[in-house]
Image (cartoon, rainbow, N blue to C red):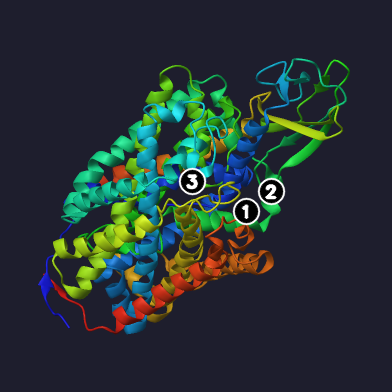
Amino acid sequence: MSQQSFSRGQWKSRVGFILAASGSAIGLGNIVFFAANAYKFGGGAFYLPYLFALFVFGIPVMILEFGLGNFTGRAFPESLHRIAGRKGEFVGWWANLNAGFITMYYITILSWVVGMLFGAFGALWRDSIPVPAFGMAEGDLANPYAYFFHMLSTWKPIFYVALVWIFNVVIVRRGAETIESATKVFVPLMWIFMILLIIRGVTLENGIQGVYLLFTPNFEVMKDPAVWQGAFAQTFFSLSLGFGIMTAYASYLPKKSDLTSNSIITSLLDSGFAYIAGLAVFSILFAFAIVPQASTIGMMFFILPQGIGEMPGNSVIVFGVVFFALLLLAGLTSSVSLVEALVSSMRDKFGWSRKRTIAIAAVIGFAGSAIFALPQVVNPGLEDDGTLGLTLLDLFDHWAFSYGLLIIGFCECILVGWVLGADKVRLHLNSNSAIKLGAWFDVLIKYVIPLALLVVLGYSVWGEIRDGLYGSAFTENYSEGFSVLRFAPRLALAYWLIICSVAALLLARRGSFAKAD
Amino acid sequence: MRKLTKTIPLILIATMIAVVNVSGSYADIILDTAYPVEKQSTRVRVVADDGSPVPNAAVSVTYRPGSAVPAVFDVGRTAADGNCEWTPREAGIVTISAAWVDATGSEQITTVNASVKYSPTPVTGIVIMIVAGIVLIGGAFDRISRLLRTPESG
């Protein structure tokens, strides 16, 4: 196997690193999902379990992932290889492959954002448009639903997918250097766009009442274990943990970096962005009496646009464009981190040139993203997901996101906590950090967090057993020619498990790693 | 990043909109005030498409719709003029439903969302907003300013 050497590159400034790491963590969901989840789980009452989960669970795992990347100076698979040999590497590749699925459909979702952004200049704000592929004439389905499903039933999103992949390739072409340059523009712009939306939201008639609604607690819901499960899962998903992203990003930091402070800043910026996004989202929803939904896709493409569509005059177009541009920027800063995590792992392993690695990742990634954008209408009545691409996306998202990330989080805690020894990472972290971690960090990594992850995973598995495999409830409405999709929930699970496991096994068994300069 | 989908319930909403538009809205629920206030009585009117009142419609309100703790309360039945009194129990976004049997004997349902204002201003909510803001935004900027003061690369 190759023992080629290659240059890994490094962040040019710590501000650049913080912007890139926070840009990675702040994704589509931060803008719309956190606030909707908080509403679902008791408004202000949700902040108590959420802050608890953030400090005892999210930030320590973020510190762990930063520490791991900086300690080894390599991306996720090689970092774990250095801890636990091929078994560790297997976990690392499994994480990367799982993240590969997420990257593919995440970019498809971004392609829909691009389509909606075009629509925001006009067509999206008409009352309705015809949706012929679903057999609907104009007026049958109101906008923004009509515009969205009409777009999904065409081949246009495949073109948008290509566009988004090109953006990603351009941004990651020189690794940390170009990612840093892009995020230095994108992340401040995201904050500016968000502040514009907040100002518009709270200045709407009774918009401020929506802010009260978001934060006023309903303690009744706190007795429900689902709230705590939701808070823990939310923290994990929100911070981009379990992807190997933070490990890859931290591997480009100098050894003498203050990793603990960097982790805390990244985590707080991520949560802080979700917090301020809630101000904008809830002020708009309250002003126009629109019920929030705890779904990123629903909030992005239906609920919030519905609210923006109610705004007076030309402000509809202005704030519609701002909203979708904000989503695009937030999505791009996240998707480039996903692509970079894969690219850095492959380069660590094979020592390929960056250009070649990116080309391979982009071609495979584009093919996968295109599958999630397939426009065939499988459910003309829209009782379920509507198109083939969206149906597949829904299924793979369930497994890769809800299970994959938590499984990886559990494995990395076990590998670092028990095989390497959490104290070794802690000593490395403490050697250059202003905030010194105590032995409590070891306890969290070895016992508390793995146990919490097991409980959350167990709760989810129990849900599958009790309610049936995810997706099995919406298999009865497929149109003729797509009845084979009734097997899709099982096939998606099997495909996801087999691809991740077999490919990870093959990669882990194949040779040694390349040497970095 | 965050959980992305769970699309199905939302697409059901799209379906509901489609159905309503296909069949034509039979009646509307109209509130006396665009933004009712919690604990203050307001009037709910159920009117047919032709503007005539819908009597004897059963009106109910779902508080916290779409949350983990929705609560449905009956408001009462509309009088002959299609009106009924409603005093919102709590503030927030609510869904008001009216159900009645039409001339053909079939059951009809119509719904509308409304935003109920807080009265007085919820102090607990504001305290939580301030504390969460200080912890999350304040905490981030405090750490950034400390980090930037130290001569460290990375």
Instruction: Identify the subunit bearing mark 2.
Output: A
Disc 3 packing (10 Å; few <14; some 14–19; many ≥20): many
In front: mark 3 or mark 2?
3
Position of residue A449 in the picture relative to residue B149 (left or right) = right
- Give the residue pinned by disc 3: A297
Q: Nearer the viewer, residue A81 or A154?
A: A154
What's the residue type where badge 3 is placed?
A: Ile
- In percent of the image, x 43 and y 50: which residue is there? A375
* SS assignment at label 2: helix
Mark earlier in primary sequence (2, 1)? 2
Is residue A216 in sight in this rendering?
Answer: no
- Give the residue pinned by disc 2: A221
Mark earlier in primary sequence (1, 3)? 1
Using the numbered discs, state the Cα–Cα distance from disc 1 to disc 3 in whole angstroms.
21 Å
Mark earlier in primary sequence (3, 2)? 2
* SS assignment at label 3: helix
What's the residue type where badge 1 is placed?
A: Val
- In percent of the image, x 23 and y 65: which residue is there? A344
Using the numbered discs, state the Cα–Cα distance from disc 3 to disc 2 in whole angstroms.
25 Å
Position of residue A439 in the picture relative to residue A481 (left or right) = left
Co-location on one chain, circles 2 and 1: yes
Measured from the top left, where is residue B140 in percent x and y? 38, 44
Q: Quadrant of the C terminus of chain A?
A: bottom left
- In percent of the image, x 73 and y 36: which residue is there? B62
- Give the residue pinned by disc 1: A227
Instruction: Identify the subunit bearing mark 3.
Output: A
Instruction: Identify the subunit bearing mark 1.
Output: A
Disc 2 packing (10 Å; few <14; some 14–19; many ≥20): some
Measured from the top left, where is residue A427 in percent x and y? 32, 70
Using the numbered discs, state the Cα–Cα distance from disc 2 to disc 1 in whole angstroms.
7 Å
Q: Is residue A239 above or below residue A470?
A: above
What's the residue type where badge 2 is placed?
A: Val
